[in-house]
Amino acid sequence: MRHIFKTIVCPVDLEAQSMAAVEMARKLAEQNEAKVVLVHSVTPPLPGPIEPSPGWENAAKSRLEKIAREHLADDIRGDPIVVRGEASAAIIRAAKALGADLIVMTTHGHTGLNRVLLGSTAELVVRESPIPVLTVGPERS
């Protein structure tokens, strides 16, 4: 059987809502004998030379590793990465650098004023990415 995907990038914002995308990425990886790389972006809070604390980045990477261990089998789990920059651009850069065939990410379902104020990372990735993007609605309890 010919497999469509070899590397799947799954952006994770470290919130429970991202687990819907992780689950979908896991299923697709199992069907395609692909790797899943969890990615978290760290956006510097202020312009200029101020950068996020290395301790915070290490904590984010530890949380990604825990999510990967809990939700992805060893044979499909790639090394999680933390990237810097505005989320949508950082996700696309990471996917290109990893040679990803697919990006699987959660939409948060913001509407109205929240969407205007918070923006839509998923929408920007869909619009700007040369790599196919599969969006998944958040899990509902």
Image: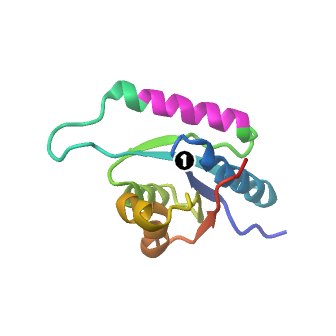
Q: In this view, does 14 lie to the left or right of 55?
A: right
Q: In this view, does 10 lie to the left or right of 55?
A: right
**Residue shown at 72%/41% (left/top)?**
72
Q: Is residue 44 left or right of residue 102?
A: left
Q: Residue furthest top?
A: 55
Principal secondary structure, stretch drawn in magenta: helix
Local crowd size for mark 1, using a 10 Å CA cut-off: few (<14), some (14–19), many (≥20): many
When the figure is inspected, residue 134 is found, relative to residue 65, above or below; the finding is below
**Residue shown at 74%/59% (left/top)?**
28
Residue 43 locus on image (x, y percent): 33, 46
- Segment tinted magenta in the rendering: 58-70
Residue 75 locus on image (x, y percent): 75, 42
User: Number of numbered discs present?
Assistant: 1
* Res 24 → quadrant: bottom right
| Location of mark 1 (residue) | 12
SS category of the residue bearing label 1: loop
**Residue shown at 69%/33% (left/top)?**
69
Residue 40 locus on image (x, y percent): 47, 45
